[in-house]
Image (spheres, rainbow, N blue to C red):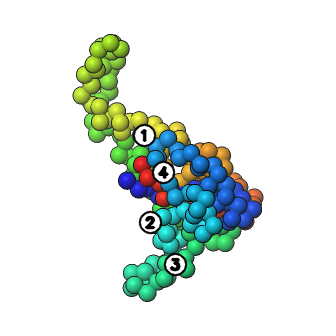
Amino acid sequence: MHTIQLILIEADTAQDAFSTIASELTDAPNWSDWHEANYQNESNLNFAGRWSGGVFLTDEQKAQQEAGTLDTSTIPNHLCYADDPELADSVVSMFLGWRKSAIQEGLPKDLLAFSNSLEVSVANYAPDKDTDFKFSMELWGLRKLITLLDNDWHYESSVYDLTLGTGNLKHFYERCAKNPQKQFIVPVDFHH
């Protein structure tokens, strides 16, 4: 399955941003088996894959796209924060909304029943026996929830600060305040 992630990176130029991302992602994150951030795509300044030309659209361009009159090949597949802070904030907010939805999905539906079952499972745990935990799918969701809340990189993080290796955007926005011309947002198509 494909997923798009906004990669936040500090660099002097867009080309430097793409080079750094390609270098840093030589090995895919542990949740991904491959991605578009490679040296072949670096020269095109395009790691967006199937989302190429569709991430950084202004309202006017969205209207053109709906009307079928927009040539998406003219839309850059990266954005320097200084070039359009309003668009950058809007796109990052949209992607963070997806992360927040994933966090909500990770919460067990019946937290009290989950907690009681977990307590029994922990009390009866034996490493040489099969576990009988009736909420195993909730454990999967809880693992995702903890990963996202801890700002670790997950396929549903949606936005990741590669400069500092975190899902926390505090430092990205601090860098934007000091050196907005060196902050780049690059969408990358990942497969997981």
- Tell me which corner region of the image, top left, top right, bottom left or bottom right, holds residue 19: bottom right
Whole-number angstrom distance, CA of label 1 to CA of label 2? 27 Å
- Between the C-alphas of marks 3 and 2, the distance is 12 Å
Q: Nearer the viewer, mark 1 or mark 2?
A: 2
Front residue (pair 35, 131): 35
Inspect the image, locate mark 4, and give the three-letter code of the amino acid beneath it. Answer: Trp
Q: What residue type is disc 2 on?
A: Arg
Q: Sequence-wise, which precedes: disc 3 or disc 4? A: 4
The amino acid type, in three-letter code, at marker 3 is Ser
Residue bearing the label numbered 4: 34
Q: Where 189 falls versus 165 (above or below)? A: below
- SS at circle 2: helix
Residue at 27% across, 25% down? 133
Q: Is residue 39 left or right of residue 113?
A: right
| Within-10-Å neighbours for mark 2: few <14, some 14–19, many 20+ | some
Q: Relative to the observer, which residue lies in front, 173 or 192?
A: 192
For the residue carrying disc 4, how many other residues have a C-alpha within 10 Å: few (<14), some (14-19), or many (20+)? some
Which residue is under mark 1?
Answer: 145
Q: Quadrant of residue 123?
A: top left
- Above or below, 181 against 34 in this view is below
Q: Which mark is residue 73?
A: 3
Taking the spot 50% from the left edge, 73% from the top edge, the residue there is 53
User: Which residue position holds label 2?
Assistant: 50
State the SS at label 1: helix
